[in-house]
Protein backbone atom coordinates (compact mmCIF):
# COMPACT_ATOMS: atom_id res chain seq x y z
CA UNK A 1 0.00 0.00 0.00
CA UNK A 2 1.28 3.47 -0.92
CA UNK A 3 1.87 5.92 1.94
CA UNK A 4 -0.64 8.77 2.08
CA UNK A 5 1.02 12.11 1.48
CA UNK A 6 -1.82 14.53 2.21
CA UNK A 7 -1.91 17.86 0.39
CA UNK A 8 -4.31 20.77 0.92
CA UNK A 9 -5.27 22.99 -2.02
CA UNK A 10 -6.74 26.39 -1.19
CA UNK A 11 -6.71 29.98 -2.37
CA UNK A 12 -8.27 33.38 -2.32
CA UNK A 13 -7.82 37.04 -3.09
CA UNK A 14 -4.59 38.59 -1.82
CA UNK A 15 -4.43 42.08 -0.28
CA UNK A 16 -1.58 42.98 -2.63
CA UNK A 17 0.87 41.27 -4.94
CA UNK A 18 4.06 42.45 -3.22
CA UNK A 19 5.15 38.90 -2.41
CA UNK A 20 3.75 38.64 1.11
CA UNK A 21 0.87 36.16 1.30
CA UNK A 22 -1.93 37.96 3.08
CA UNK A 23 -5.54 37.33 2.14
CA UNK A 24 -8.19 40.07 1.88
CA UNK A 25 -10.90 38.07 3.66
CA UNK A 26 -10.20 34.80 5.48
CA UNK A 27 -13.92 34.02 5.53
CA UNK A 28 -13.89 33.86 1.73
CA UNK A 29 -10.97 31.45 1.26
CA UNK A 30 -11.69 28.74 -1.28
CA UNK A 31 -10.74 25.36 0.20
CA UNK A 32 -10.57 23.19 -2.90
CA UNK A 33 -9.83 19.97 -1.02
CA UNK A 34 -7.39 17.55 0.56
CA UNK A 35 -5.68 15.03 -1.73
CA UNK A 36 -3.74 11.80 -1.07
CA UNK A 37 -0.76 12.72 -3.27
CA UNK A 38 0.91 15.67 -4.96
CA UNK A 39 -0.19 14.67 -8.47
CA UNK A 40 -3.89 14.83 -7.56
CA UNK A 41 -3.37 18.06 -5.62
CA UNK A 42 -1.58 19.61 -8.59
CA UNK A 43 -4.48 18.72 -10.91
CA UNK A 44 -6.92 20.36 -8.48
CA UNK A 45 -4.65 23.41 -8.10
CA UNK A 46 -4.38 23.81 -11.87
CA UNK A 47 -8.14 23.59 -12.33
CA UNK A 48 -8.78 26.21 -9.63
CA UNK A 49 -6.05 28.51 -10.96
CA UNK A 50 -7.41 28.28 -14.51
CA UNK A 51 -10.93 29.14 -13.30
CA UNK A 52 -9.58 32.39 -11.83
CA UNK A 53 -7.05 33.30 -14.52
CA UNK A 54 -8.75 36.67 -15.13
CA UNK A 55 -8.42 37.71 -11.47
CA UNK A 56 -4.90 39.05 -10.88
CA UNK A 57 -5.38 39.14 -7.09
CA UNK A 58 -6.43 35.49 -6.76
CA UNK A 59 -3.82 32.86 -5.92
CA UNK A 60 -4.02 29.17 -5.10
CA UNK A 61 -1.54 27.15 -3.05
CA UNK A 62 -0.63 23.56 -2.30
CA UNK A 63 0.27 22.79 1.32
CA UNK A 64 2.20 19.59 2.04
CA UNK A 65 0.15 18.55 5.09
CA UNK A 66 2.03 15.27 5.47
CA UNK A 67 5.14 17.24 6.44
CA UNK A 68 3.34 18.52 9.54
CA UNK A 69 3.36 14.96 10.83
CA UNK A 70 7.05 14.42 10.11
CA UNK A 71 9.24 15.98 12.84
CA UNK A 72 12.21 16.29 10.46
CA UNK A 73 10.34 18.62 8.10
CA UNK A 74 8.64 21.92 8.74
CA UNK A 75 5.54 23.27 7.08
CA UNK A 76 6.23 24.13 3.47
CA UNK A 77 3.90 25.83 1.00
CA UNK A 78 4.31 25.65 -2.76
CA UNK A 79 3.07 28.80 -4.44
CA UNK A 80 1.86 28.24 -7.94
CA UNK A 81 0.68 31.15 -10.08
Image (cartoon, grey):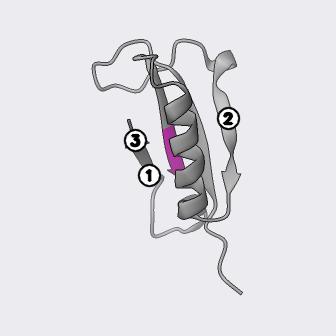
Helix, strand or loop at label 1? It is loop
Q: Is residue 3 above or below residue 39?
A: below
- Mark 1 touches mark 3? (CB < 8 Å): no
Is the residue marked by circle 1 packed among few (<14), some (14-19), or many (20+) residues within 10 Å? few
Q: Quadrant of the C terminus?
A: top left
Q: Is residue 76 above or below residue 81?
A: below
The residue sitting at 44% across, 52% down in the picture is: 76
Helix, strand or loop at label 2? It is strand
Helix, strand or loop at label 3? It is strand
Q: Position of residue 6 (x, y in %)?
A: 64, 61
Where is mark 1, residue-wise?
Answer: 76
Q: Which mark is residue 31?
A: 2
Q: State yes or no: residue 63 in magenta.
A: yes
Q: How many marks?
A: 3
Where is mark 3, residue-wise?
Answer: 80
Q: Position of residue 23 (x, y in %)?
A: 50, 19
The residue sitting at 57% across, 40% down in the picture is: 47
Q: Is residue 78 above or below residue 1?
A: above
Residue 4 or residue 70, whichever sits in front: 4
Of all residues shown, which one is farthest toward the left? 18
On the picture, is 69 further left or further right than 77?
Answer: right
Earlier along the polypeptide chain: callout 2 or callout 3?
2
The stretch of residues the image draws in magenta is 61-65
Q: Position of residue 44 (x, y in %)?
A: 60, 47
Dominant secondary structure (helix, strand or loop) of the stretch shown in magenta: strand
Is the residue marked by circle 3 packed among few (<14), some (14-19), or many (20+) residues within 10 Å? few
Give the CA distance from mark 1 to mark 3.
13 Å
Give the CA distance from mark 2 to mark 1.
17 Å
Amino acid sequence: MTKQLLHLVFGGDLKDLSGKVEFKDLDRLDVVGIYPNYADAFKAWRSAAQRTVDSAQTRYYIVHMHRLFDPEHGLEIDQED
